[in-house]
Every structure is written in structure tokens, then in C-alpha cells.
Image (spheres, helix red, strand yellow):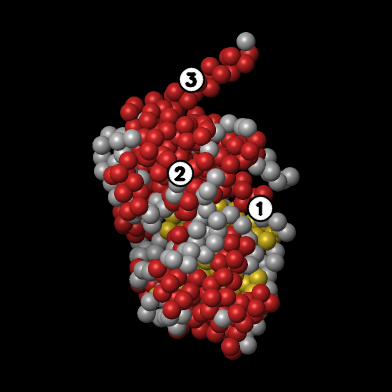
């Protein structure tokens, strides 16, 4: 049975449809980058709100690069299933909050007009870190980025998310459609402030009057999002269809846990997301830092170490006692101690909860998926923790091990000699560094630390960081990940013994 509006009444037993008439609700949100995460996170919260309260809050999705999602969702009237899985059971529901999906390269003006539509109250984004065309080390707009240069020259036909935002805001200004909120749901530090800085800078390069209008009519609340959503493999979709009898080209899987912390600073109306469990706050930063450094930081560390060691899935990494101990040490001794912990967060309980989520074997979350785009992720996931402890004289070895593992990962070869494709916007630059300096670990590390778009200006000047990363990089290359991590624990134990004596 194909999933459509017409077949909702005949869903297989155990699968629940929307608990409201979704076809009677209008669009109030335009979402750029309607990938799997958004559809398992914000779209689910919005679906839950509309089941409890009237409101035209359906989501018009925008796919910026790929036809895949429009081709999956539009024939299904925007409907799709979410399978919530843990190691013991799973439940399935059909989400009705997505009204449809525009394919931006073919529907450019429709996207711009959707942003300008007076009924649109919110434009939200999950375009990944690299989609903001910014310098991760500084948060500034990267004016040399090819997509930004294209959009500045031809804003009538944008290609970047930032170009679409500014083109839509310009159309909104011209049609006097009122105030609007831009809501980032990506893993950027202070994501609202970052998007505001980027958008306003781009707008000022287009038209100073537009930049002033944005300052007066557009709000940029920050948010912190959390839910693990692994890629849905073809065999997973086939298994779902065979198990349920439902033909759903857009089915997704996720974990039971979900969290959304939102700065309650909107230019106009918004859904009552708090009814669905979102936390509305005046300051997102403490929650954001905890998530970026504890969850995302350890996720990246275990992905690089685990993939190099030959582990395909997160739960396999966690089943290795040495790497599991490393993840716990990273969280406990470096990530957690770098935080200003929110009053309502038990950091030890949070650490244990994260590890339990990583243990969820039902999700089959690939280390390779997490390892993608490290040049955009490492600055906020690892380097902020490192900088904190450098200032305070605290421990840095776990973070330096993770950085060393990333440097080895972007060589495109694991510790067993298996070659793979590095998915990263700077992959070519990193490959060139390895070709030039691969035989000299010190020269290689120095060259990477001099990559200012990732490491900024400060770390290349820090002899402690250089020496530590070189040391761990050599161990990983010469003896493998497990030996390097085991060496770390032996040194830690020796230091503890020396202090006791």
C-alpha cells in the first residue's frame, strides 16, 4: 500500500497517522534543508503541537541540492513514517506536518516567494555546518566561497542557503509582508547570532537599506537540537515494507530520545512547541555548549578513532572496552569540566545517558556518517574544549588524541591500509597536505594547525598543542588506535600514582 492522504485511513495495524486533519492546516514555516534530521525532530514537534492546538503551522520544505527528497515526499502528499527504535522495541507513526517540498534549483522563485509570503512566520534551517558558507573558526561570512560570490553577482538566482534567505527577505521587504524569524537548527555555536552575522553581512553587500530592514524586522533566536538520526539504508526501507506492508519511500528511523532548547525571541507568532516538550529559555548557550562538547565532541572522537580501528557503527565502538573507556574519559575529564553547567542539568547523569544512547544497536549509526565534514565540525566540537583547558591549565590529552585521529582520518586511509573517500569541503586541501608532508609528522601537524579556517590563529602558536598532537598522531600511525589509547590510560595511571606518592 502506497502512503498517501487517500490511504491514511487504512494504515497497517500498529502504525498511527496524524492525530488532526493535516490537510486543513496552512503553511506557516519554510524549512531550508529538509533532510532526515529535520523530519525526525522539528517536524515531529510541530506535528505534536498541531495535534493539540489549532494553527496553520505546516512546513513547506526546500531541498537545496538534491531531487531525492522532493521525489520521495511529494508523491506521498508530504507524508512519511518515523520508526522510533531502541535495542528492545520499536514504534511507528506517520507525520503530517510537511505540506510538500520545493526543489530549489528548479523552483527558485517559488522558494523566494514562499519566504516573502505574509503567512510565513518562520524560516528554519538544517543545512549542516558547511551550508552556511562561513569561516568555522571565526563565524564570519566567507566572501570568497564560490556560492557566495555567485549569489552576490546574481541574487535573482541564488544557490546558497544564505543567498535564498537574503533574496527572500528582500522580496519580503519589497512586498511589505512584515516581520519574520530565522531559526537555525544546526550544530553551530550561538547559531542564531552566527546566522544573524552572516545574513546581515551578506545583505549589506547587496543593499544597505535591506540590511537596515533586516535589523528592524527579523529575529534570529538560537536553538539547541538533539536526536540521533542515522541514514536510512535501502535494505532498511525494504525490511520496513516487508514487515508492515506499507510502501513508504521516505521512511526514517531514530532513537526515542529527543531534545530541543529554543531562545524565546521570535519576531512574530510561533507554534507552541513547549506543548510537545521543547524548552523555551532566555539563554541557550549553556545547553548548547553541553551538547556540542559532550555529545557532538565525543561522537566525533569515537567516529574518527572507531573508523580508523575498523568499526563501522557507533555501538561497535562502544562495545570495545578500550574505546568505551576513552569516550567516558573524554566526557568526564575534559568535556564536562570545560562547561558552565545549567542548574537543571545533572552532568554525570547526562554523561551516562549519552553513553546509553551510543549503545543503541538498533540504530546502526555509521561512524563514517558522523565523520563527514570534520573541517566544519571540529572547531566547535573539540577546539572550544581544548581552548578552555589551555587557558585554565587543565587536561588536554583526550582532545589532542581526537584531533590526531581526525588528521589521520582525512588522509583517506585507515590503520589497516583500507582506502576510503573523505567527505569534506576541504578534502582536496587536506589530501594535498598529506601528499606534501605525510612522511614528516611534525611538518604535517604544523601545516594542519596553520589552516586558520579550522584552527584559527592561536593554536598554531601553541607548542604544547603541537607536541601533543604530533605525539598521538605518530602513535596512531605507527601502532594503531587501540595502542595509542591504551598508552594514554597507562600514562594517566602513572601520573595518578606519582601524585599519590
Q: Is residue 360 left or right of residue 66?
A: right
Q: Which residue is mark 1?
A: 285
**Figure check: 436 above or below 50:** above
Give SS at disc 1.
helix
Location of residue 429 in the rendering, given as x and y in whole percent from the top left corner: 35, 52
Question: Dots 2 and 3: beta carbons under 8 Å?
Answer: no
Give SS at disc 2.
helix
Q: Residue at x 38, y 28 (%)?
A: 475
What number is the disc on residue 490?
3
Give the CA separation, mark 2 to mark 1.
27 Å
| Image quadrant where residue 147 sits | bottom left
Extreme residue in the bottom direction? 175
Label 2 crowd (10 A; few <14 / some 14-19 / many >=20) = many
Give SS at disc 3.
helix
Q: Residue at x 36, y 35 (%)?
A: 441
Instruction: Report whether residue 313 is seen.
Output: no
Location of residue 357 in the rendering, given as x and y in whole percent from the top left corner: 51, 42
Label 1 crowd (10 A; few <14 / some 14-19 / many >=20) = many
Location of the C terminus (image quadrant): top right
Q: Residue at x 56, y 48 (%)?
A: 292
What number is the disc on residue 449?
2
Label 3 crowd (10 A; few <14 / some 14-19 / many >=20) = few
Amino acid at each position: 500500500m502506497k502512503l498517501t492522504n487517500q490511504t491514511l485511513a487504512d494504515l497497517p495495524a500498529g502504525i498511527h497517522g496524524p492525530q488532526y486533519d493535516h490537510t486543513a492546516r496552512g503553511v506557516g514555516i519554510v524549512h531550508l534543508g529538509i533532510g532526515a534530521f529535520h523530519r525526525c525532530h522539528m517536524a515531529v514537534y510541530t506535528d505534536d503541537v498541531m495535534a493539540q492546538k489549532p494553527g496553520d503551522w505546516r512546513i513547506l520544505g526546500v531541498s537545496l541540492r538534491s531531487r531525492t527528497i522532493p521525489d520521495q515526499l511529494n508523491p506521498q502528499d508530504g507524508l512519511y513514517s518515523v520508526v522510533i527504535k531502541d535495542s528492545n522495541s520499536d514504534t511507528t507513526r506517520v507525520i503530517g506536518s510537511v505540506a510538500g517540498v520545493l526543489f530549489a534549483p528548479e523552483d527558485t522563485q517559488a522558494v523566494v516567494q514562499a519566504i516573502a509570503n505574509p503567512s510565513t512566520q518562520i524560516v528554519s534551517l538544517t543545512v549542516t555546518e558547511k551550508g552556511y558558507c562561513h569561516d568555522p573558526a571565526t563565524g564570519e561570512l566567507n566572501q570568497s566561497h564560490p556560492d557566495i560570490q555567485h549569489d552576490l553577482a546574481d541574487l535573482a538566482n541564488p544557490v546558497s542557503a544564505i543567498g535564498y534567505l537574503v533574496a527572500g527577505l528582500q522580496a519580503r521587504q519589497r512586498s511589505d509582508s512584515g516581520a519574520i524569524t530565522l531559526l537555525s537548527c544546526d550544530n553551530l555555536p550561538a547559531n542564531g547570532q552566527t546566522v544573524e552575522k552572516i545574513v546581515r553581512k551578506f545583505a549589506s553587500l547587496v543593499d544597505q537599506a535591506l540590511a537596515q530592514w533586516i535589523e528592524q524586522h527579523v529575529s534570529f533566536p538560537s536553538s539547541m537540537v538533539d536526536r540521533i538520526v542515522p541514514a536510512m539504508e535501502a535494505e532498511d526501507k525494504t525490511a520496513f515494507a516487508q514487515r508492515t506492508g506499507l510502501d513508504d519511500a521516505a521512511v526514517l528511523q531514530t532513537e526515542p530520545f529527543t531534545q530541543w532548547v529554543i531562545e524565546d525571541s521570535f519576531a512574530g507568532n510561533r507554534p507552541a512547541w513547549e506543548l510537545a516538550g521543547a524548552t523555551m529559555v532566555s539563554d541557550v548557550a549553556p545547553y548548547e555548549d553541553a551538547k556540542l562538547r559532550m555529545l557532538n565532541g565525543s561522537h566525533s572522537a569515537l567516529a574518527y578513532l572507531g573508523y580508523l580501528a575498523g568499526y563501522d557503527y557507533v555501538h561497535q565502538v562502544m562495545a570495545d572496552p578500550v574505546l568505551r573507556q576513552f569516550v567516558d574519559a573524554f566526557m568526564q575529564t575534559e568535556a564536562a569540566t570545560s562547561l558552565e553547567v545549567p542548574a537543571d542539568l545533572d552532568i554525570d547523569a547526562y554523561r551516562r545517558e549519552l553513553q546509553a544512547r551510543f549503545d543503541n544497536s538498533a540504530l546502526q549509526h555509521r561512524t563514517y556518517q558522523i565523520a563527514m565534514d570534520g573541517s566544519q565540525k571540529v572547531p566547535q566540537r573539540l577546539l572550544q574544549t581544548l581552548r578552555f583547558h589551555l587557558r585554565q591549565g587543565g587536561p588536554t590529552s583526550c582532545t589532542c588524541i581526537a584531533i590526531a585521529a581526525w588528521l589521520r582520518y582525512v588522509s583517506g586511509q585507515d590503520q589497516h591500509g583500507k582506502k576510503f573517500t573523505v567527505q569534506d569541503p576541504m578534502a582536496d586541501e587536506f589530501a594535498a597536505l598529506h601528499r606534501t608532508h605525510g612522511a614528516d609528522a611534525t611538518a604535517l601537524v604544523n601545516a594542519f594547525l596553520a589552516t586558520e579556517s579550522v584552527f584559527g590563529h592561536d593554536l598554531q602558536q601553541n607548542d604544547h598543542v603541537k607536541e601533543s598532537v604530533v605525539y598521538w598522531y605518530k602513535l596512531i600511525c605507527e601502532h594503531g588506535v587501540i595502542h595509542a589509547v591504551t598508552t594514554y590510560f597507562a600514562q594517566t595511571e602513572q601520573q595518578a600514582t606519582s601524585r599519590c606518592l
